Amino acid sequence: MAGIPLSALDVAFLCLESETAPMHMGAVVTFRPRGDVDPRQLTRLLAERAARIPKLRQRVKAALFPPGSANWSEDPDFLAANHIHHHRVSGLYEPDPLSAYASRWIARPLNTRKPLWDLHLVTGLPGGEFALLLKLHHALTDGAGAYAIAAGLLDDVTAAERPKAAAGTSPRSPVDAVKDTWNQAGEAAGIASSVVRAARTPVSPLSAPASAERKLGFARVGMADIRRIRRSHGGTTNDVILAVLAGALRGWMVNRGQRADGRTLRALIPVSVRGRAKEQLGGNKLSGYLCDLPVGTEDPVERLRQVRQEMNRNKAAGPGRGAGAFPLLADRLPSVLHRLGGKATGLAAPLLFDLVVTTVPVPGARLSLDGARLTSVFPFVPLAPRQAVGIAVAVHRDSVHIGLQVNGEAAGDIGSLHDAVLKSAAELYSAAD
């Protein structure tokens, strides 16, 4: 029996995959147990829960028709325990053993002939805490879908937080189908035109050589600070976070001897286009905005004002229009085109953007694993080919968790970027009334 087909966008992420640009997202999640941790018991529990998640049992299988397409198929040799590993770190050899271990872990590509996920349990952390390191290929899902998958590994969540079942859809008449096809063709043409107009000379201070080495950093900003900044200067939580990151990138560039004044860095900001009633465990449902981060502006309040203007323009246009909507365009191209030109498309990413800044939805409810309370969740976005930095953000309860990933050969000073995030947040907070 034929499996569920991958969308064209899912296939595109597979085609972008390479040893130096693996297309998986990740998360480092820490937990505080009530007592000692039994790694064997915990890995057994995780294996039992993973085995009940259909997406984690499936692998990609090429389809004969349409050309270049593929389906999700149950792996006949699936054993959840083969995807789950335990490692105990020691602080005797490295100042931040979790970051060092996670950096090596995130750099390793997934085996695309197997189910596209990997899970590491890391013990030996200060205070008796432990961490889960979850890796999911972007072909499997987007950030919103990733939480829906990860929720199945945690203790029972409330009904409001569970992944929603797919809603039934009414059959469409032939006339409606033709109208939809015509409308989509018109939208695709408009997006393609915007993409061409937005292309730039690919000269970026965040360009990087092809390298398999990665460095990860974990930065945390208090939500109370973000709320105070919003009350004083306006904007959304996302606007404030983008302004903080713009200031951090400015400081980081200056520390590396690069000119920041008079420059902007263009961020691709993925936008979920999942309907509320749609299946939350499905593949990628993405569009995007392009936002010029004002790293050339020294005043932190003015940076926030400029970010607000940029994002207001994006929101007024909507996620279905403009050059940032190119994921929608990719989803409407035949899969065979991604098979033929996927690598070239990846190398062309700097023509449109300098880095990715994404927000991963995490509910505010208390989350736990085997009774251990979740204390932090740091997401990570894959690096586009030849780009030095990728940033992912998760807001959970009283903190903004910022996952920093850099190309280790181009930018090994992840500590400098981490410190720049905290300094930028402090400057904007100090400017609040």
Image: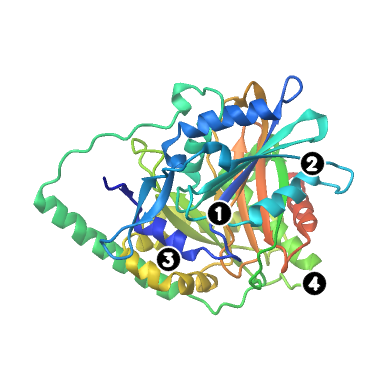
Kindly report the distance in space between the C-alpha atoms of the residues bearing marks 1 and 3: 30 Å
Task: Of the two numbered discs 4 and 2 on the same chain, state the one appearing first in sequence.
Answer: 2
Distance (Cα) linking label 1 and label 2: 22 Å
Numbered disc 4: secondary structure: loop
> Residue 10's quadrant in the figure?
bottom left
Tell me the residue that label 2 is attached to. Answer: 89
Q: Earlier in the sequence, mark 1 or mark 2?
A: 2
Q: Of the two numbered discs 3 and 4 on the same chain, state the one appearing first in sequence.
A: 4
Q: Measuring 74% from the left and 48% from the top, which residue is drawn there? A: 101
Residue lying farthest right?
92
Q: Amino acid at mark 3?
A: Ala
Q: Going 79% across and 35% down the picture, which residue do you hit?
A: 124
Q: Earlier in the sequence, mark 1 or mark 4?
A: 1
Which residue is situated farthest in the front direction here? 77
Looking at the image, is mark 1 or mark 4 nearer the viewer? 1
Drawn side of residue 22 relative to residue 244, left or right:
left
Work out whether residue 349 or residue 267 is closer to the camera in this orientation and state it. 349
Residue 230 on image: x %, y % = 62, 41
Dot placed on the residue nearer the N-terminal end, 1 or 3: 1
The residue where tag 3 is placed is 323
Nearer mark to the viewer, of 4 and 2: 2
- Where residue 257 is drawn, which disc sits there? 4
247 or 163, which lies in front?
Answer: 163
List the residue tagged with mark 1: 110
Which quadrant is home to the C terminus?
Answer: top right
